[in-house]
Amino acid sequence: MNNFIVTRLSATSTSGKISTVHLEPGVNIVCGPSNSGKSMIVNCLDYLFGGKKEPFDPLVEGYDCVSMQLVNENGEILIIERAIGLDDGQAKPINEVTIDSEVDGIEGGVYKVKPSEKPKRKSYMDILMQILGIPNTVKIISSQQGKTQRLSPRTFFHQLCIKEEDIFKEKSIIENPGYNSITPCINALAYLIYEGGVREDDYEDPEIRKAKKKAVIAYISGKISSLESKREELQEEIEKAGTADVETLISEMMDEISAADAEITKVQKESQKLLNDIYETDDKLTLEKQLKERYRLLHSQYDSDVKRLEFIIEGESSKPDNEQSRCPFCDSEVHVPRDRESYIEASKAELEKVRLQINDLRALEDETDERISVLDSRQASLRAKSSSVKDLLAKEFCPKAEKLREELANYQRIAQLKQEVDTLDALSSEFSMDIFEKSGEDESAPVFDAKEMFDTSVFSRLSSAVCQAIRECNYPEFRVAGLSQSTFDVVVNGKDKRHEGKGYRAFLNTLYAFTLMKFIEDEGIHKPKMLIMDSPILSLKQDVTDPASDDMKSSLFSYIIRNCGSCQVLIAENDIPENVDYSDANIIRFGRGEGTLRQGFLVRG
């Protein structure tokens, strides 16, 4: 089991007596007459590796517990113990093992052999998988329909432990006697070698696939029905509108709206021009009124000047010719003669000039009043026109444009409804096509043929290794050998193994199993490196005249001992060939009856 070997196999009696055999690396051979307890060792190992059948009856043998000691290359020890129970006087397997561990990562304790549906902790099978470096979540394909099952040591242990009743079977040693199909066995082998045999996607039950298909078709049909109902509603709304060529009406309506917008723009420009003229006239009126105010102020000044000059002239005309005054030094009267005539004349001339200016000013004021009058009239006209244009915009052009836009929106709504109808028709057509395609889908699950899925290059190399092994073991009249991909079994000289006699089948099965173990050791990722075989040559019969050194039995044993290497092999056999070098093998001999040999596996008395 990877880098572990079994060093000790023990059985404990109800009284505490312990029977033990010690095993070594390499080849271990337990030999002795029939019914001496050789097969019991094979059965005990099978039981300790999770087998479902108890190796013996505690009531008959007086033993009720078996154990084995595993040691890895670091010298770390793992002891596994499993009891044998009783139920109404009948022996029954116990679904628990007790582990005593010195190995890092493996805790000692009691473990269930078969894991529950929702295990709270590792099972014993998980521990064995851990020893092989395999995650406990690996699922291999177990049927051609693609179902998967959890990979367990029991999926491939039959390839490592071939019991007496199976050593000469017609079917391939790859096939588990307890399975109805070879598929999980091939895929388990594929996983050990190159981690193949697994499914990339999740398995889906065919009935579930059919139900999903039916549900999808029902869903799509419901969608089509919903679309048809919506289409009827839209079509009814379109028919109420009563418009046939909506696109033409929309085009005409947009032309009318463009014309109306152009008219509005023209009138708005005219209104803006009128407004500018009003502002300009207002500015001119303001200037003219300011000028008129200045003229008024000037006229008032001139009127004041006239009164002043008239006062001066009148006052000067009423005064005497000489005017007395006093000297500022002596206060005496001084007579100052005056030229009154020149002074009065000057005032009159000034008065005349002012009156002329007043006349000119009146003319200017009249002109200003006239201009103001004209501007007032223009202003009134402009305001009237502006009001008329605004009324035209507000009461005619804008309402017309708004009405046109409302009609356009209505037509566009109808066009949108028609477009939605077209979209619904397209969707309905797509959904109908989906139903057609879905209905035509193949409901059958894809076929997962493990034989065809197995890596061809790996199979070819394994076949060559089997051929070489058979050649080296001096198979009679050997020409060619290999594996058939249709049966995953041995073919020699074009003849399938199942057509051979029992002895030859046992020989070929033994050699195939040994070659497979060595092949996995050389090329595999997960390497059990263990092989247990019961009676590989018991029923072998030959009609050959070759010397004993070339005998098939001798060749087989010599080949296994010579090529075992770091693997561990246990062979249980009645008689072993004598002309074989067993110096590299551990031979355990059992006897029956009186004698010095050990009387079977279980110690009596």
Image: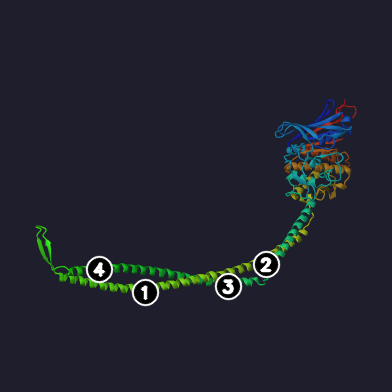
Name the kind of residue labelled 4 in the image.
Answer: Lys
Q: Mark 1 or mark 3, which is nearer to you?
A: 1
4 or 1: tag closer to the N-terminus: 4
Task: Return the mark for residue 418.
Answer: 2
Q: Position of residue 525 (x, y in %)?
A: 72, 42
* Disc 4/disc 1 C-alpha distance (Å): 29 Å
For label 2, the SS is helix
Name the kind of residue labelled 3 in the image.
Answer: Glu
Determine whether 101 is above or below 176 in the image: above
Say whether marks 3 and 4 touch (CB < 8 Å): no
Determine which residue is flagged by label 4.
307
Q: Nearer the viewer, residue 260 or 421?
A: 260
Q: Position of residue 101 (x, y in %)?
A: 73, 31
* Disc 3/disc 2 C-alpha distance (Å): 23 Å
Determine which residue is flagged by label 1.
370
Task: Return the mark for residue 514.
Answer: none
* Disc 2/disc 4 C-alpha distance (Å): 95 Å
2 or 1: tag closer to the N-terminus: 1
Determine which residue is flagged by label 3.
256
3 or 4: tag closer to the N-terminus: 3
Snapshot quadrant of residue 524 = top right
Label 1 environment density (alpha carbons within 10 Å; few <14, some 14–19, many ≥20): few
For label 3, the SS is helix
Label 3 environment density (alpha carbons within 10 Å; few <14, some 14–19, many ≥20): some
Q: Nearer the viewer, residue 77 or 115?
A: 115
Q: Position of residue 211 (x, y in %)?
A: 78, 53
